[in-house]
Image (cartoon, helix red, strand yellow):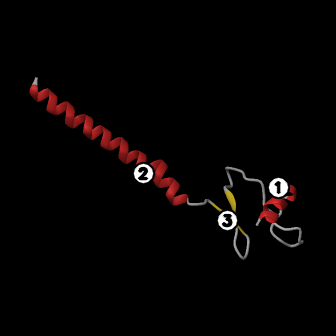
Amino acid sequence: MMARWSNVARTGRLSKRPGLISWPQYYQQQQQYMELGLMQTLKQNLKKERVHFASVVLTQQLEQSAGDLHALTTTQWSGLL
């Protein structure tokens, strides 16, 4: 594995053997990544669903909960005054 990482740093390829997939530079628009295993494969959008959940769905739910909590505490305090 160390030799493969050294080759990537030096040549952009996992191995010096011809015919293997070249490891392309990462561009955010394409979001390609290299899946390492018995066969190396180029893929896109690693954990796309998890990233969407964490950045969109969870954020919306937290904002809604904060708003609900604010409304609840405001209502409770206004009844005491």
Which mark is on residue 44?
none
Query: Tag 1: residue type?
Result: Ala
> What residue is at 69 percent from the left and 73 percent from the top?
37
Q: Nearer the viewer, residue 51 or 3?
A: 3
Q: Position of residue 6 (x, y in %)?
A: 82, 59
Instruction: Look at the image and tell me in which quarter the N terminus lies.
Output: bottom right
Left/right placement of residue 48 relative to residue 23 reads left
Chain-order first, disc 2 or disc 3: 3
Instruction: Look at the image and tell me in which quarter the C terminus lies.
Output: top left
Say which of marks 1 and 2 sits in front.
1
Q: Nearer the viewer, residue 3 or 77?
A: 3
Determine which residue is flagged by label 1. Answer: 9
**Callout 3 crowding tier (Cα within 10 Å): few <14, some 14–19, many ≥20:** few
Q: Position of residue 7 (x, y in %)?
A: 84, 61
Pointers 2 and 3 in contact (C-beta within 8 Å): no
Q: Give the image quarter of residue 13.
A: bottom right
Determine which residue is flagged by label 2. Answer: 57
Determine whether the residue tagged by mark 3 lies in a helix, strand or loop: strand
> What residue is at 72 percent from the left and 76 percent from the top?
38
**Callout 1 crowding tier (Cα within 10 Å): few <14, some 14–19, many ≥20:** few
Query: Tag 3: residue type?
Result: Lys
Query: Tag 2: residue type?
Result: Val
Determine which residue is flagged by label 3. Answer: 43
Q: Position of residue 36 (x, y in %)?
A: 70, 68
Determine whether the residue tagged by mark 2 lies in a helix, strand or loop: helix
Left/right placement of residue 26 relative to residue 55 reads right
**Callout 2 crowding tier (Cα within 10 Å): few <14, some 14–19, many ≥20:** few
* Residue sitting farthest toward the left: 80
Q: Is residue 37 above or below residue 72?
A: below
Q: Is residue 32 above or below residue 18?
A: above
